[in-house]
C-alpha cells in the first residue's frame, strides 16, 4: 500500500509522511464521519475496541463515498451495492458473488490518539512512527491546565496559515486590540532552528499590557511581554506568550514565573484552497476553572477571526496573475526558513535516492 | 441541416440519432419554454395547430436566446433587434432591411406527441422515424391505468442514471425500506438482450412483501416478487415489478395475475453534469383511482430521492482524480452490456462508413 | 512605471491609454474604497487636500489588498505587517527595518475630477492628458440641468454594453413601452464618424410620442422624435434624444427648440465578464426641479433594467461553444465601426512602432 508522493503533492507542497490532526477525540464516535486531508477523502469512526479507524472514502466499485453507507459492526457497508470493508480496508463481502477479489480494498490510514487529540498518518504506512507525534510535558503536568478550543476553517493554503504562526510581526497590525499593540511595531524578531522546530521570538520590555493580558492577567502597571513562536515541521505551532510585571526584569528562562500560555495550532491541509486549524491552549493559571477557559476561548475567537480575514484575502489575491514578484523584508526570516524546509521535504518525498554509484557508469580506458 | 456528431458528443457519450422526452404534453402551451437537451439549448411552444415546435434557442444575429423574445402568432420575434423566425426555423423578418439572408435561420427539431408525452429528435432530421418512438400496448389497454408522475432533476451523467435502471442489485441497499429488502441481497441477476432492449431480472421467491407492496398490494403472507429491468437504448427504462402470493407459485409469464406495475423512466441528457428523468407508471390495479395514483407517486418520490442522493454523490466522486481504476463485479452485467452498446452507437455516429472498397487499394502484380 | 499592454488586454480588448469613470465625486471620501478597472484592483480615497488618490490595491509584500488596511493621514498602512504607502505609491515605512527598498512601491494612477465625476487614467502615466477627458458645454450652461443618476452593474463584456449605445435599432424591441415604439421598427439608421466619435442616428417623423415623452414632455398630438447616439472611443456614450410637435417640422440642428435630453453613459470595464455603467442626464427643461430628476431616474431605471437583462443573456450565450458564426445585418453598422476602432486601438497599444528605417536593412550592390 505504498502511497508515493506525486506531482500533485509537489504542486500543492503537501508533506505526506507526517502526522496530522484529524480532530478532537470528542469528534469521533459510532457515526461515520467524512473528512478530507491532503486532498484525500477519508471516512472515520470509533470501532468497538475504542480505536479510531480511518479509511479511504471511496468504494472501489462505483466510487460512492463509504461515508454515505452504513456501519455494520466494525465494518462499513457501501450504500450502493453493499460491498463491505473492515477496519483494515479489506473487503469482507461482495453481494451476489462468493469470491472476494484482491483489488477490492480501500486504503487504511494509521491513527493514534493522545491527550484528547486524534492524529492520522497520511504517508507510507511502513514509515508511521507514533513516537514522532507532537507532545509536550505540560499536557500531563498538574501545574498546567489544557483546554481544547475549536477548529478554524480557512479558505487559504496551509503554508500561509502555518507561516502566520512563525511570524510575530503580524500581531501588532492584525491584532492591535487583542494580542498585540503598537508598542511592538518595530521590535526586532529573532529566529533560530533546532531539528524540526523553527522558533521566532521577541520580548517587548516595559510596555502596557495588551488587551488579552489586561483581561486575563490582572496587571495594573507596565509588563515585560514575550512571544515565542515554535513551528514544528510540517505544521504544528506552539505559541508561548505571556507577561510579567516589568519591574521584576526576569530572565528569558524564568517565564513560568509570569502568566504563561501555550496556544497550540494543529494545521491540517485539506486542499490547496482550504485548511483546518485545530486550536487549543495550555496555561499555568486558573487550573480547572472552566469560566476562565471559556473567556479565553472567546478572546482567541476574536483574534483568530482577524487572522482568517487576512489569510483569506491574501489567498484570493494570490490567485490573480501577478505583474511583479512579491518582496520579502526583514521580519520574514521565520516564514522564509519555514518555506524552504517544506520545499526540501516535499522534494525529498518526490525523489527516490539510490545512494552513490559503486562504480562510475563510464570509465574511459586509453 | 445535417447535425454531425462531433468530438464533444463522443466525450459526453451522447447518442444524437434518438428520440428523447422533452416533457409531458401538459408542460407545453402558448408560452415560450426554454430547455436544454444534449447541450443544445432549445425553445419550445405549442403552435396554433396544436403541434409542439422546437427550435434552436439562439438568435443567429447577436445570440440572444429566442426564449427571451416574444411569440407573434406562430413565429418568435427576437427580443433584441426583432429578427423573426417561423416554426421551421426560417427567418421571416429582419427589421431595417428587405432581404432575408439564407444564413439567417435557426435549427428546427422534429417533435412527436404520444400518450401525453412529447418526444424530440436530436439527430439528423432525415433519419427521424416516428415509428422508432418507444411504445407499449398497455398505454391503450383498458385493464391498465397510466399515470404521469413527475421529473427528477439530477446532477449526474445520464449513463449513471440509465445504468441504475438496468441494475436490480442496488435495490436492496439503496431502497431497503421501500422497493427492496435484505431478502434479495444475494439473489443472482440474469441479463439478456434482444434488439435495442437489455433486460436484467430476478425473482425473490417466498419472502415477506417489501414496503411498497405492503402498502399497495395488501398482502398478508409471503410473496413471490419479481423485478424485470428493460432498458431500451439509449435511455428509456421499463421496470416491470410486482408480487403475488407465494403459495400460487406462478410461472414467469403469468405475472399479470399478480399485482403488476410498470415504472417508466425517460432519461434525457441535459449536459455531461445534468440529467432529467421523467417518470410515470402503468398498473393493472385501481384503474381510474386518483388517490391510488397520488399514493404511488408519494412512494416513488421517496424511493427516487434515495437514487438521486447516490447518483449525485457518485457523480461528484467521479470528478476527482482517481488513483486506481474502479472495479467491476458480478452484478454489473447489465450496466456493462449497456455501456458497451452506447459506446458502439456513439462511435458509429462519429464515423462515416463508406462501404467495402470495390477494389483493393493496393494490388501487387508480379 | 510603464504599464505595457499585454496579451491579456488584447484578449479582453481593453484600451488602457484612456480615462475611465471611477465613480461620482460623492462616492469618494475619507474611507478606503476598493474598485477594479481593466482587471486592475485599485484602492481610492480622498486625501486631506481634497484630491482623490488611486493606488494599486496590493501590498507588494504579502499581497494583502491595501483596502483591507487603514488610513493614517494621507498614507495607507497595510493590515498585515504595517508597510505604509503615500498617495504617490511610495513606501514610507517598513516596520522592523530602517531601509526602504526601491521595489517596495505600489502603482499610482492619475485621477481627475470634473463636474462631479471622478476619472482615472489606466495607461502609461506619461501619456495622461487631462485635456482628453470627455466634456460638453451643456455641463456649465444655465439653460441645462445636469443630474447624476446611478451605476449599473452588468455581468457582460464592456464591448457589448458600449455597442448597445451606438445601436438605435434595439430600442423598438428592448424598450417598446419606455424609450421606443413599434413606429420605429423599420426606420433606417445613419452612421457617421468624426475623430473619436461614432454617431448613429435616426428621426421618426410624425408618430405618437413614446412612453418616456408622454410622461415627461406633455405632448398631446404626434411628434417628430430623434435619437443621436454618439459613442466616444473607447466607451463614453452621449445619447441625444428628444421630441417636438410634428407640425413644426424643425431642422435637425434646431433640436434645442424641442424637449431635448442627453443621456450619458460612462462605461467602465471591470473584467471580461463584468462592466459598470455610470449613467446621468442633462436636459433643457425643468432646471433645478428635483422631482423631475427623480421621475426621470425612475424611467431610466426601468429602461436600463431591460438592457441589462438582454446584455447578460447575450453574454451567457457567448460563453457557449458556437456551431455557426453569428451573422451581421444592416442595422449593425454602428457596432461594426465601433468594434473595428477598438480592435485597431488595442492592436496599436500592444505594438511598438519604431518608425521607418533610415536605411533599408539590406541593399544589394551589383
Image (cartoon, coloured by chain):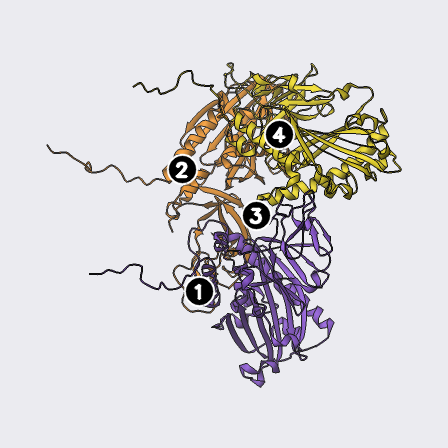
Chain colours: A orange, B purple, C yellow
Labels 2 and 1 touching (C-beta < 8 A): no
Query: Which mark, residue C36?
Result: 4
Image height check: is B88 above or below A345? below
Which chain is indicated by disc 2? A
Q: Where is residue B54? Give x, y as percent.
A: 64, 58
Give the label, 2 or 1, closer to the camera. 1
Quarter assignment of residue C333: top right
Residue farthest to the left? A366
**Camera-nearest residue between B111 and B329:** B111
Labels 4 and 2 touching (C-beta < 8 A): no
User: Which residue in the protein does label 3 denote?
Assistant: A26
> Quick check: can you spot residue A342?
yes
- Helix or strand or loop: what does disc 4 sit on? strand
User: Which residue in the protein does label 2 denote?
Assistant: A346
User: Which residue in the protein does label 1 denote?
Assistant: B329
Q: Where is residue A236? Give x, y as percent.
A: 49, 36
**Which residue is at 38% across, 51% downward?**
A1
Amino acid at each position: 500500500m505504498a502511497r508515493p508522493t506525486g506531482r500533485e503533492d509537489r504542486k500543492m507542497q503537501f508533506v505526506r509522511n507526517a502526522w496530522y490532526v484529524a480532530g478532537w477525540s470528542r469528534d469521533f464516535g459510532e457515526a461515520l464521519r467524512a473528512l478530507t486531508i491532503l486532498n484525500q477523502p477519508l471516512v472515520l469512526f470509533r470501532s468497538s475496541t475504542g480505536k479510531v479507524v480511518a479509511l479511504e472514502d471511496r468504494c472501489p466499485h462505483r466510487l460512492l463515498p463509504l461515508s454515505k453507507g452504513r456501519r455494520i459492526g466494525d465494518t462499513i457497508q457501501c450504500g450502493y451495492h453493499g460491498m463491505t470493508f473492515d477496519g483494515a480496508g479489506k473487503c469482507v463481502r461482495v453481494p451476489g458473488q462468493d469470491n472476494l477479489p484482491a483489488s477490492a480494498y480501500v486504503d487504511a490510514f494509521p491513527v493514534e490518539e493522545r491527550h484528547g487529540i486524534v492524529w492520522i498518518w497520511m504517508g507510507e504506512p511502513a514509515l508511521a512512527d507514533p513516537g514522532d507525534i507532537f507532545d509536550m510535558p505540560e499536557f500531563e503536568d498538574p501545574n498546567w491546565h489544557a483546554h481544547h478550543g475549536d477548529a478554524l476553517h480557512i479558505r487559504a493554503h496551509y503554508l500561509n496559515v502555518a507561516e502566520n504562526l512563525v511570524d510575530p510581526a503580524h500581531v501588532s497590525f492584525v491584532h492591535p486590540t487583542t494580542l498585540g499593540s503598537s508598542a511592538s511595531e518595530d521590535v526586532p524578531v529573532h529566529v533560530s532552528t533546532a531539528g524540526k522546530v523553527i522558533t521566532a521570538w521577541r520580548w517587548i520590555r516595559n510596555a502596557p499590557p495588551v488587551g488579552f493580558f489586561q483581561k486575563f492577567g490582572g496587571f495594573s502597571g507596565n509588563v515585560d511581554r514575550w512571544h515565542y513562536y515554535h513551528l514544528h515541521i510540517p505544521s504544528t505551532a506552539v505559541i508561548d506568550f505571556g507577561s510579567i510585571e516589568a519591574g521584576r526584569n526576569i530572565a528569558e528562562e524564568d517565564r513560568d514565573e509570569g502568566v504563561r500560555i501555550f496556544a497550540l495550532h494543529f494545521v491540517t491541509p485539506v486542499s490547496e484552497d482550504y485548511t483546518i486549524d485545530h486550536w487549543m491552549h495550555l496555561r499555568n493559571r486558573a487550573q480547572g476553572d472552566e469560566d476562565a477557559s471559556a473567556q479565553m476561548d472567546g478572546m482567541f475567537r476574536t483574534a483568530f477571526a482577524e487572522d482568517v480575514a487576512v489569510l483569506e484575502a491574501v489567498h484570493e489575491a494570490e490567485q490573480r496573475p501577478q505583474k511583479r514578484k512579491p518582496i520579502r523584508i526583514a521580519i520574514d526570516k521565520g516564514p522564509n526558513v519555514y518555506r524552504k524546509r517544506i520545499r526540501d521535504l516535499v522534494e525529498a518525498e518526490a525523489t527516490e535516492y539510490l545512494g552513490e554509484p559503486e562504480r562510475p557508469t563510464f570509465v574511459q580506458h586509453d
